Amino acid sequence: MNDATFDQLRAALREMRGALRTNVPLAKLTHVRIGGPAACLVEPFAEGDVSMTVRACRDLDLPLRVLGGGSNLIVSDQGVAGVVMMLGSLNRVVRDGNRLSAGAGVTLPTLLSGARKLGLAGLESLTGVPAVVGGAVKMNAGTREGETFDHLCSLTVVDRDGEIEVRDRTSLSPSYREGGLVDLIVVNATFDLHEDSPQAIYDRFEANLQRRNSAQPVTERSVGCVFKNPTGDSAGRMIEQAGCKLMRRGGISVSAKHANFFVNDGGGSFADFMDLADQVRDRVLQRFEIELAFEVQVWD
Ligand code: FAD
Ligand code: EPU
């Protein structure tokens, strides 16, 4: 972003509460630690400031992306033009009876442990998903035990014109790993939970975590599953059967523990990741005649 454009953006956002920075490295903000800088990173303080940012980007014709926990993202080594918005300041959780409303920047571990302490059950299926609420809703993050939309009753969103709206669950059409939001930005989500003892909730957390830890390379740098599962099968199983386990391109390799995870041993690049993904997709296509589709979101 050149200085003149940045000055225009700063002027348009002079009343916005929050931070505005240029040329901010994104790699450290992603789980897999890959990617160049964001031309501009905006961290609005509250919902109205998100709205102001959306309007400013629309008026200046600047591309706008939202970064959540960065756990399902692969960013180009050149970085991204335009504005990246982070919603970490939207971090309040409010209880109303059996409902919990959480800002888009609340991490799932914070939400889940808060729910457990309050004796509110339902979100245990999301144990171990390293997301924030906005990213979990956008992706309809889930496991074999359940997904984000299972207990979602409403969302507060900002639309492309910066209008803040409340959307009922029934007006949304989520599917597997897809919240169906198109270009809506999530600023808050309300979950309808049910009462249970904190100990019973904790026991389910523990069981889910143990299952995950034994099956996935959770201590390594990855994007989680790279590809979606084809209906009725597991991409991990297919990748292993196609002989791809431990394949490597530069600093990125197919995990020995779970073949749908690609891990970055420290020096991996965007090009390495995409090259490996192409090779794996080709081998699975040859072996099974099924073309795997990315679950990972690509910013290039
Ligand atoms: P990001 O990765 O930052 O962004 C993902 C997408 O959401 C991007 O398109 C971004 O623009 C968009 N987005 C983010 N915030 C908002 C917002 N407020 N409004 C609108 N759009 C937004 N996923 C699963 O589903 N199940 C799993 O079991 C699972 N396990 C994982 C394990 C590991 C070790 C890792 C690294 C990842 C795993 N994932 C899993 C993938 C990932 O955690 C999920 O896709 C998660 O939902 C991404 O959330 P995030 O906040 O990190 O979003
Ligand atoms: N398998 C292999 N080899 C492998 C990996 C898996 O043979 O390398 C086999 C397993 O032995 C098992 C079957 O494939 O028989 C299914 O494996 P697993 O239970 O690990 O589930 P998955 O289908 O690979 C899905 C989700 C995960 C989620 C887990 C647990 C997708 C793409 N993956 O994995 O979500 O955590 O179930 O619920 O839907 C993600 O989306 O990023 C993610 C990690």
Image (cartoon, rainbow, N blue to C red):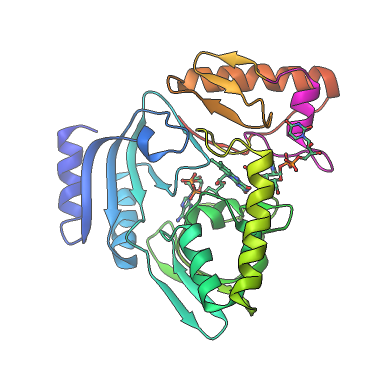
55 to 275, vertically: above or below: below
Q: Specify whether residue 170 is in view.
A: no
Q: Is residue 246 above or below residue 142?
A: above
Give the position of the C terminus as an image quadrant. Answer: top left
Q: What segment is highlighted magenta in the picture? A: 226-245
Quadrant for residue 75, please give it: top left
**Residue 231: in magenta span:** yes
Quadrant housing the N terminus: top left
Tell whether 89 sits left or right of 197: left
Image location of residue 118, percent across then percent down: 52, 78
Q: Residue furthest bottom?
A: 97
Choose between 203 and 40: the one closer to the eye.
203
User: Which of the pair 284/17 is nearer the observer?
Assistant: 284
Q: Main secondary structure of the magenta part?
A: loop
| Frontmost residue, 89 versus 46 | 89
In this view, the residue in front, 102 or 207, is 207
Residue at 43%, 38% in the rendered image: 30
Q: Is residue 105 above or below residue 221?
A: below
Vertical arrangement, residue 282 with respect to residue 30, above or below: above
Q: Quadrant of residue 194?
A: bottom right
- State the residue at coordinates (67%, 54%): 208
Whether residue 240 is visible to the viewer of this picture, yes or no, is yes
Residue located 35% across and 49% down the image: 85
| Drawn side of residue 79 relative to residue 188, left or right | left
Left or right: residue 95 versus residue 224 is left
Whole-percent x, y for residue 284 in the image: 77, 22
List x then y, in percent, for residue 171: 63, 69
Residue drawn at point x = 36 percent, y = 63 percent = 90
Where does the image place residue 109, in percent across and percent down from the top left? 49, 58
Q: Quadrant of residue 238?
A: top right
